Amino acid sequence: MRYTTVIKEMNVLFNGQIMVASRDAIVIQAIPISGSMLPQNFTMERIREVEGVEKSTPILFVTPMSLSGIVQTVPVNFSMGIPVKDWKTILGPTPLKGDGAHYPTNETSNEIVVGASLADQYAWTVGKEVVLSGKQLKITGILDTKMALLNRCVLMPLKLAQTVHNYPGSVNIIAVKPAEGYPQKNLTGAITKKISYVQALTEEERNDMIQPVLAQVETWNVGMQTVILAMSLILVMTVTVMTVSERRRDFATLDAIGAPLNYVFRIVVLETSLIGVLGGALGIGLGSLASLVLASLYTNIPLAQFFPSVFEIVPPFYMLETFVAVILVCCAGGLVPALNATRMRIAEILRAEY
Amino acid sequence: MKIKTVDLTKKYRIGPSEITAVDNVSFEVDEAKFMVIIGPSGSGKSTLLNLVGLNDSPTHGKVFIDDIDTSMLSNGSRRKIRLSRMGFVFQTFNLFPTLNSLENVEMPMSLAGVSRKQQNEKALTLLDAVGLHARASHRPKELSMGEMQRVAIARALANDPEVIIADEPTGELDSRTAKEIASLLFEIKRNEKTTVIVATHDEKVVDVAEEVYTIQDGKLKSEN
């Protein structure tokens, strides 16, 4: 869920822009995964020569980034190096918090701004000095945003980022803004024609590339849910068949004393529905807690930091959907045993008692 | 309630063989009578009571209640008769284990749609009548066998039935308690003008009976 959020957010940050990366890089939205680095100046000069380019911004995007020597199972921290003059273009009007907070003022300073989640985890405040890859850096602001990507991001001037991450004069992605009215598709064609070692992706192409991955994740989720619900259905049905069998004398007695035809049916279905309500509530509670614990274990982010964002990790609609599905499954699981209970032959059951 | 059976027969198929549990039984019992059917185990007593109590359908023959042929009634109508005009007492009491004595007695009234307040008042009165007012909040497992059967009798009386059908009501009880239960059933018959049909092999019940029948291999014979 978190990665889906981050991937979607990348599209918000680079809305309307073309992303240029090395030809061998895998680009997920605007995140280049592996692939060669691009020579910054050489590539930027050629991009500027292409007709229809209004603005281009070189970016060094590094992930995973290990902080405090903690080994992370999955990458959760990101580092972005952006030229100081282009910060507003990429981040928009993202406010900073902290006394005297400000964005870095020049390319060669050692100033950085950090995401709120990172700041909370490592007790970073404005003015504090931190060491990253052996370099002493000064925090000048904490990003005040709800974006998951920026919350776990260390932002620094591009030159500083190239020094810190040891990629001097290199970037791995360039955001290109087309001139007004200039079609993105034409521009990508022109860029790749002029620069042989790059790929240029329009917003639509980036979405098309990521859609199958997201669809696969979705299919996997739905598949897992279906299997789990089917197993629950069988389990509820089995347990209810057993409990009905154990209580057949009670049901026969109810029948004998004249309970309406659907009375026993209603009791059984009501009981399984109640199991669904209780089980659903308990399952959602424990499941949400488990997902937070797992998220914390996999990311090394303290559990307490996840509690405020529990409804982002497990959205309320998903909780409701699961709750309703569990109740329906339990109801369905009770139907067959309930029908069996109503079809019992009272005389045979009562006679067996004597 | 007047009950009449005509050539009542019930056959069961167990594997390849056919067993005649009730064989051509015809009898008539008038209102407010105490009728006892005696016979050894497997003689067909319970099957006959199930047929008379509309809990089972005969293979042949008919059961008339107040001259109405019950075979012509729908399942729902038979249920209504069982709920509002009949009371059942079972050998193993068949109380609902999760309900207390009061709730067990209230159950038939609840099924009949009696108001909550009336259920409570009537159930307490009935428990009082069977001497168990103080045990109203006790669950069946907290009661003795005799007490459980008294609760079962109170439950059978909940909807003011015209007939009580009791299958071996003293079968699980000791001699002294069995005598008390037999007397209680007779008191009910006398005070409430209720017809009582009891299947038993207990002589203490036979002693208070007005009409006695014996059943052997499904055939009923009057001993009057």
Image (cartoon, coloured by chain):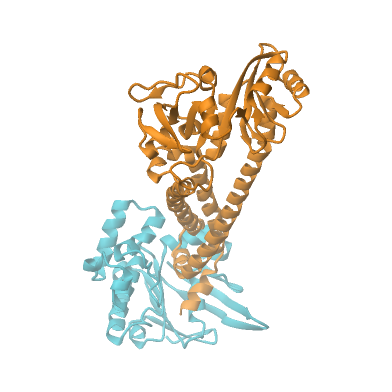
State the residue at coordinates (44%, 87%).
B223
Q: Confirm whether residue B162 shows in the render.
A: yes
- State whether residue A219 is above or below residue A343: above
State the residue at coordinates (32%, 79%).
B182
In front of the other: A269 or A32? A32
From the image, which quarter does the N terminus of chain A lie in? Answer: top right
Position in image of residue A113 (x %, y %): 44, 27
Q: Residue furthest top?
A: A180
How many discs mark residues in the rendered view? 0
In front of the other: A328 or B211? A328
Q: Residue furthest left?
A: B134
- State whether residue A285 is above or below residue A112: below
Q: Is residue B112 left or right of residue B58?
A: left
Q: Is residue A276 left or right of residue A62?
A: left
- Chain letter tied to orange: A
Q: Confirm whether residue A315 shows in the render.
A: no
Position in image of residue A86 (x %, y %): 54, 18
Position in image of residue A29 (x %, y %): 63, 31
In front of the other: A178 or A5? A178
